[in-house]
Image: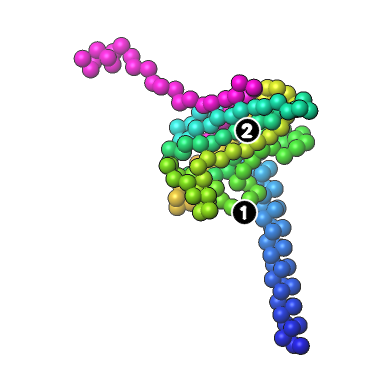
Amino acid sequence: MRKVLTGILCAALLSGCQMSKQKNTAVKGETSYEGYYKSIEDNDRFLSYSLYYDISAEMTSMADGTHRYYIFLDSPQIAMYDVVMLAVEDDIPYASAGKMMPCIGVFESTDYSLIPFQANSKAGFMKGLVISGACTNDTVNIKMLVEWSDKTLENTRREYLSFPLDASGFHSEVPTRQITEEEVTANE
C-alpha cells in the first residue's frame, strides 16, 4: 500500500512539474511574440529580398469574401538553426492587433532548422517553412522578421523584410549587379 501511495505521489509531482513547464513555455512564447512584434514596429529599415534564402507569397480569395495568404521561406543558402518568422499586416500596432499574426518558431517547443540541400523533418531539418494568415482586404502590406542562429547557437541574425501582397503574389528576387562600361573595357 505504501508503494502505491508513493507511486501516486511521484506521478502527481511529475505531472505538476510538466504542467508548470508547459505554462512557463506558454508565458515565454507570449513575451517572445510581443518582443518580436515590437521589434518589427520599431524597425525602420526593411529589405525586399535576402541573400540567405528565398521568400515568396501567394494570396487566395475565400468563399466568405476574406483572403488567405501564405508566406514561404525556401532555398536556404546557409545553415539556419532555430528559425523564427513573424509577419505583421498593414503596420497594425501590437496594442491594436485584434488577432494573432502569422508566426512560426515562437510558441512551438520544436526548433525549425534549414540546411542547404538537406531535409529531414523528423530531425527538425525542414526543406522550407510556411506561415499563413487571413485578412479582409485583397491587398496587404507585409512587414516581417526572420531570425536564425548559426550551428553553435551563439550567433543570431535578424532580417526585416517588407513587401506588398495581392492576388498576383510575391517572389523576392536578388537583384543582379549591372556591369558598367568601364568594367567591360578594363577586362578587354
Dot 1 surroundings within 10 Å: few (below 14), some, or many (20 or more)? few
Query: Viewed as shown, does residue 85 lie left or right of 173?
Result: right
- Residue topped by disc 2: 70
* Residue sitting at x 70%, y 53%: 26
Residue 7 to residue 59: above or below: below
Q: Is residue 184 magenta?
A: yes
- Residue 180, horizontal then vertical, whole percent: 33, 14
Neighbourhood count class around disc 2 (C-alpha, 10 Å): few under 14, some 14–19, many 20 upward:
some
**Visible in this render: residue 128?**
yes
Give me the C-alpha separation between circle 1 and circle 2. 22 Å
**What range of the chain is rendered magenta?**
159-188
Q: Residue furthest bottom?
A: 1
Q: Helix, strand or loop at disc 2?
A: strand
**Number of the label disc, if any, that sits on residue 78:** none
- In this picture, residue 164 sits left or right of residue 81: right
Residue on which disc 1 sits = 109
Quadrant (top left, top right, bottom left, bottom right) of the N terminus? bottom right
Q: How is the image coloured?
A: rainbow
Q: Residue at x 70, y 22 (%)?
A: 138
Q: Which corner quadrant of the image does residue 43 belong to?
A: top right
175 and 124: which one is in front?
Answer: 124
Vertical placement of residue 14 versus 83, above or below: below
With 131 as the anchor, is 7 left or right in this view? Answer: right
Which-is-in-front pick, marks 1 and 2? Answer: 2
